[in-house]
Structures are given as C-alpha cells and as structure tokens.
Image (cartoon, rainbow, N blue to C red):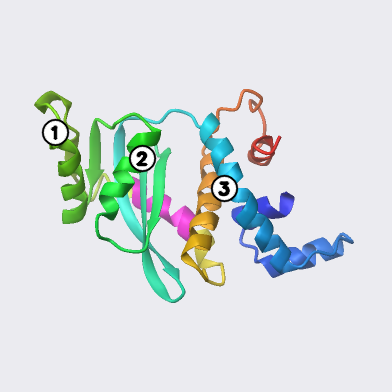
C-alpha cells in the first residue's frame, strides 16, 4: 500500500518504486505495482467519497488537457471559493462533456448557487441546459470571469505537475483510474477528508484510514 500512495503522491516512476523496494529487500516488479494502483484506486476513491467533507455552493469550473496515447483529452474540474475540490471528469471528446461533468458533480454534492467559468460556449450551454426547467429563483447563476477563475487554474497545476512527470498514459481507462488517485491525494492534502478517526493525523495516515 505505501507504494500505491508514493506513486500517486510524488514524482516517482514505477521503476523508481521497484528499485526503492529492492533496496529494502522486497522484490516486486514495476508491472505488479501498476496492477496494484489500477486495482486499488477505485476502492480508495469510493471509500474517500463516504468521508468527503461538504463543499461550498460557489463553484469555479474549468477544463485542462491530459495527453493519452499521444492525443489530448479533456479533464473537467471544479473547486469552490475556498479551493476545495468539487469533482473531476476525464472525457475523450468535448461533445456534451461539460453537461456530463456538471451532472456528475451535482449528483455527489448540493447544487451550486453560482458557477464561475471562462468564456467557453460549451460550459455556458451546459449550465443553461441545467437551468432550463428551473423556476427563476432556483436557477444557477452563471458568471464569466477570467480573474475569478485563477483559483481553479492554479489548482490544475497541482494535478498537471504530477501527470507531467509520468511517462504517458497508455489507455483512457487507466488514465481515468490514475487521475482519480492523484485527485484523491490532492483532496486529502487539502483537508477534505472527514474521517472520524482522522483528527490530528498526517495526510499519509489519513490515506491509510481508507484501507482499514
């Protein structure tokens, strides 16, 4: 389990981890480590969502890009006004991707009061679709502001910093899984886990609570 956390949290390749374990007298192939990551992250993500702290209702949403098999794909992300991660969604195509992202985020959280976006027509259209059947006093306020969206753009960098140091994603599904693990580590570091036994624990110790 430490290897899984180290891979998701730090600028380490699977071969780096293979060498580190060998120095400790433990023989484990890098391909085995990769299988552990792919197998365990979905369970860790599910466990984390049970203890995730509530987020605010003023969201900042933006998209960034992740290279998979040499092609750029779309990573949609949102944070609240305090920088807490709302949700994320990796999409192969841009068609209706923003709407799918918002529906996923709302399914896991309270509906936002305000969403700040850039001037993307697709993002505006997605929010307008969500507002279409709402009473006027229940609609989500759509705000376009490059300045206010600096918060989410800065948050992207924490994720991109880790993915940039990887050798490249070989499949879309594996990229989804590994990104979920990286996002999980990032949220734990931001104090977003509300596990009843987590008070006063380090980020690493809080991560291991998800396995218990």
Give the left or right position of residue 76, taking residue 121 as reference: right
Displayed quadrant of residue 166: bottom right
Work out whether mark 3 precedes mark 1 in sequence or the reverse, and give the earlier one: 3
**Residue 158 among those drawn in magenta:** yes
Does the residue at mark 2 contact the one at mark 3 (Cβ under 8 Å)? no
Vertical arrangement, residue 140 with respect to residue 7, above or below: above
Please identify the quadrant where the C terminus is shown. Answer: top right
- Residue bounds of the magenta highlight: 151-160
Q: Which residue is drawn at 48% across and 53% down?
A: 158
List the single residue furthest toward the left: 136
List the single residue furthest toward the bottom: 70
Vertical arrangement, residue 179 with respect to residue 170, above or below: above
**Residue 65 among those drawn in magenta:** no
Does the residue at mark 3 contact the one at mark 1 (Cβ under 8 Å)? no
Pointer 3 residue: 42
Give the left or right position of residue 20, taking residue 211 as reference: right
- Give the Cα separation between the discs numbered 3 and 1: 34 Å
Pick whichever, 176 or 162, lies toward us.
Answer: 176
The reply to whether residue 192 is in sight is no
Q: Residue at x 50, y 48 (%)?
A: 183
SS at mark 1? loop
Pointer 2 residue: 105
- Give the Cα separation between the discs numbered 2 and 1: 18 Å
Pointer 1 residue: 133
Please tell me whether the stretch drawn in magenta is mainly helix, strand or loop.
helix
């Amino acid at each position: 389990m430490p290897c899984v956390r180290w891979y998701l949290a730090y600028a380490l390749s699977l071969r780096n981890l293979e060498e580190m374990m060998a120095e400790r007298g433990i023989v484990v192939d890098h391909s085995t480590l990769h299988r552990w990551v792919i197998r365990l992250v979905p369970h860790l993500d599910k466990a984390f969502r049970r203890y995730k702290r509530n987020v605010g209702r003023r969201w900042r949403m933006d998209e960034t890009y992740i290279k998979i098999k040499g092609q750029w794909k779309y990573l949609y992300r949102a944070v609240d006004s305090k920088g807490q991660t709302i949700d994320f969604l990796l999409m192969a195509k841009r068609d209706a991707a923003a709407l799918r992202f918002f529906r996923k985020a709302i399914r896991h959280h309270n509906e936002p009061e305000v969403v700040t976006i850039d001037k993307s027509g697709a993002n505006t259209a997605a929010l307008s679709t969500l507002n279409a059947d709402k009473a006027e006093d229940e609609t989500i306020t759509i705000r376009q502001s490059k300045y206010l969206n600096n918060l989410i753009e800065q948050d992207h960098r924490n994720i991109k910093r880790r993915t940039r140091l990887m050798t490249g994603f070989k499949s879309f599904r594996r990229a989804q899984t590994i990104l979920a693990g990286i996002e999980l580590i990032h949220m734990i570091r931001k104090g977003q886990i509300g596990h009843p036994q987590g008070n006063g624990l380090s980020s690493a110790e809080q991560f291991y609570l998800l396995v218990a």
